[in-house]
Every structure is written in structure tokens, then in C-alpha cells.
Image: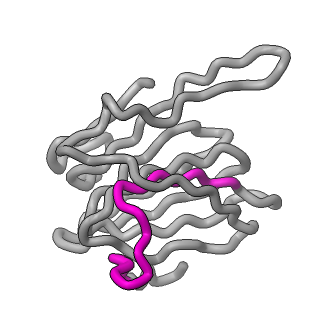
Amino acid sequence: MGQRHLEKQTERKGGKVMIEGVSVDALDIKRDERGWLAELLRASRLQNGAQLSQLYVTVGNPGKTKGKHYHRRKVEWFSVVSGNATLYLKDTKTGGEEVVRMGEQNMVTVTIPPFVAHAITGDDDGPFCLIVVVSEEFNPQDPDTLSYDFPNL
């Protein structure tokens, strides 16, 4: 995987400040006549003691937004493996924002640390398929999921 990892807020082309702890890792896609394969995440690349505890898949409909929340403890890794979507990120502590287009046109895995609000919207006429890995299992008695308003989404 090629990687653009951010240890702290850094400036990117165009003067945009990126969010601390967020990384966008380009996937190495192996293609042949049978299809393709991509390694989304491996434990040896985890940072700050993060663990892999839950894996799920969700499908988003065209033009619809999912998420609009953040976590205080959980780290999440997002990868759109079919279709295309736009991931909106906002640091709830600093106000820093980042937008990542992801999917068939930009195959990446995005690391979302605690306190970074996230929402994802389908870009195409068809659905998108999002694979999510979470550092902590979902507990309905302590969900660690706080709503966050993304105006215009």
C-alpha cells in the first residue's frame, strides 16, 4: 500500500490543513482476467496500540449520506470497494476539515481516529459498498457514537 500518513496536522497542496491522525492509504490493486484483489488493512500497520475488533460491510444508496457521527474511543478504517463515494471528515476539536473521494476511481483505505466526525455520500447512479473495520466492538449499552451535524449533507 502506498501511504499518505499524517502524524500531526500538516499542510497539503492548496494550503489545506489536514486532520491529525487521519491517513489515506492508496491500495495496491492486483488485477487479472479473473478480477482484482486489494489488501485493505494489516495489523502491522496499526498505530498507537489500535486493535481490529469488528468488521462490517454497508451499502449506501446513490446521493444518500450515512454516518454523521464521531466516536470518543474508536478508530475506524473505511474502504469503498464498489461504486464511488465522498467521505467528509471534520475534527471536532480543531475544526479541521478534509474531503476524500473514494471507491473504484480512488481505491484507498482511510483511517478515522477518535473525535473526527465522518459522513459518507454516494456519488454515482448506483450504490456503493463500504467495508469498515473498527477498533472496538459495538456495545448497545455503551455505543460510543455521538451525532454530528454536517450542514448541507
Q: Position of residue 128 (x, y in %)?
A: 71, 56
Closer to us: 71 or 90: 71
Q: Let me know if residue 54 appears in the view.
A: yes
Q: Which residues are magenta?
A: 129-146
Residue 86's image quarter?
bottom right
Colouring = one colour
Q: Position of residue 9 (x, y in %)?
A: 17, 50
Q: Which residue corresponds to the image point at 44% horizontal and 57% vertical from the top-left?
A: 99
Q: Main secondary structure of the magenta part?
A: loop
> Above or below — where is 102 with respect to 142?
above
Q: Which residue corresponds to the image point at 71% horizontal and 18% vertical from the top-left?
A: 31
> Above or below — where is 72 with respect to 108?
below
Q: Which residue corresponds to the image point at 68% horizontal and 40% vertical from the top-left?
A: 104
Closer to us: 30 or 99: 30
Q: Position of residue 52 (x, y in %)?
A: 38, 47
Residue 12's image quarter?
top left
